[in-house]
Image (tube, helix red, strand yellow):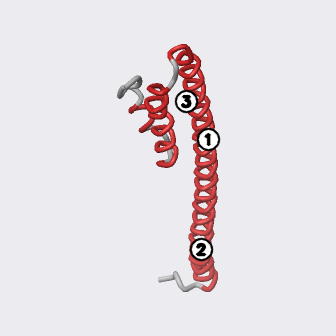
Amino acid sequence: DLVGEAHTKTISSLFMESWRTEMEEEINRINQVLPDTQTRDKTDEIQQWVDAVLDKMDHYKAEHHRYVKEGVTLLELALWKAKLDEKEDSSKEVRTKKAKIDVESARKEKRITCGADMA
């Protein structure tokens, strides 16, 4: 075989299984084509194959980058929303506490003005 196992790590890191399968098929294609290729044409055939493999790999890397970027954007939006929800919950809690404090201070004030605290 012209291509050994050196490509395995790169191929296994591809995001989608269909990409991995397609790359494996493309890489193995040379092993099917070369035995039937005339000796004088082998260099050209290998060069075309290398170009095809590299082009496909570049395409999948670009797609992978696009998926990662999309995922990061979704994660940022989710974190932003969670932070807004957290602030909203915190704001409600502060208003509730403030309302309780205001009620208590109003009661205390009424007791003082009505003379209920006098012993």
* Eye-nearest disc, 1 or 3: 3
* Element on which disc 2 rests: helix
User: Which kind of residue does numbered mark 3 sit on?
Assistant: Val
Judge whether 57 appears above or below 81 on screen: above
Residue 37 numbered mark, or none: none
Q: Which residue is mark 1?
A: 63
Q: Quadrant of the N terminus?
A: top left
> Observer-nearest residue: 35 or 108?
35
Q: Residue at x 55, y 24 (%)?
A: 50
The residue shown at (41%, 25%) is 3
Q: Nearer the viewer, residue 108 or 62?
A: 62
Label 2: how many Cα within 10 Å (few below 14, some 14–19, many 20+)? few
Mark 1 secondary-structure assignment: helix
**Relative vertical location of residue 25 with respect to residue 97 in this rendering, above or below:** above
Give the class, few, some or many, for how many residues have Cα within 10 Å of label 1's Cα (few <14, many ≥20).
Answer: few
**Considering only order in the chain, which callout, 3 or 1, is on the residue closer to the N terminus?**
3
Q: Position of residue 15 (x, y in %)?
A: 50, 44
In-image side of 23 versus 74 (left or right): left
Please give the residue where the numbered disc 3 appears in the rendered image.
Answer: 53
Q: Residue at x 54, y 15 (%)?
A: 43
- State the image quarter where residue 62 is shown: top right
Query: Where is mark 2, residue-wise?
Result: 105
Q: Which picture quadrant has residue 6?
A: top left
